[in-house]
Amino acid sequence: PTSSKPLWLLAILAAIVALCAQPVRWNDFAHFNAATAIATEPDKPILQRETMLGIDDNFPDQKVQSLEVLAASISVISRIPVITVMNTILPPAAAILTVLAYAHLFQTICPGRVLWCVIGTMAFIFANGQAEMSYGNIFLARMFHGKAILFSVITPLIISYSIRFIAH
């Protein structure tokens, strides 16, 4: 896009917000614990047992998590603690990717207004935080959750590439 410098400034601002706004909910610890268990016991099967409650068999929805596996892998390879990876590396990286994903989407939909469309989208999502699981509360504040990255990064890219595919 022609407005790449302001777009990168917006991406850096989003990364700062993602670092500063991390509310903690009671079930967030399960995500950190799963990643820690993978990193500290790499010889054991991944996500097969629930390590916080001491249950031998993990809950079915917990067996398909991928962000925890990524955080544990980054931790093992870089020797950075899992909590640091999940709190200070993944959220700002995902926030930057969010701005770039929306820029990609709006470059497809309305090429001349990319920056303003991204700013408007980010402002709307920030303002839409009235419910616990609304986009505003899942958006930058919970970028250590896979669903936040799915909604914020992957979904705009899927829409953008679908439009491009249909157009060609």
Image (cartoon, rainbow, N blue to C red):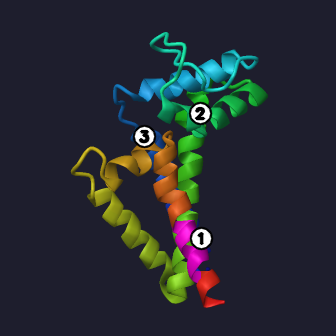
Of the residues shown, which amino acid type is indicated by label 1?
A: Lys
Name the residue tied to disc 1: 5
Q: Residues within 10 Å of mark 3 (few under 14, many from 20)?
A: some
Residue 13 visible in the displayed image: no
In percent of width and height, residue 106 lies at 51, 78
154 left or right, relative to 75? left
Instruction: Write the start and end of the magenta stretch as one range.
Output: 156-163
Q: Residue furthest left?
A: 130
Q: Separation of disc 2 and disc 1 at Cα? A: 32 Å
Which mark sits nearer the N-terminus, 2 or 1? 1
Q: Residue at x 69, y 22 (%)?
A: 45
Residue 163 has which mark?
A: none
Q: Quadrant of the C terminus?
A: bottom right
Residue 20 has which mark?
A: 3
Which mark sits nearer the N-terminus, 3 or 1? 1
Of the residues shown, which amino acid type is indicated by label 2?
A: Glu
Q: Separation of disc 3 and disc 1 at Cα? A: 23 Å
Secondary structure, magenta segment, majority class: helix
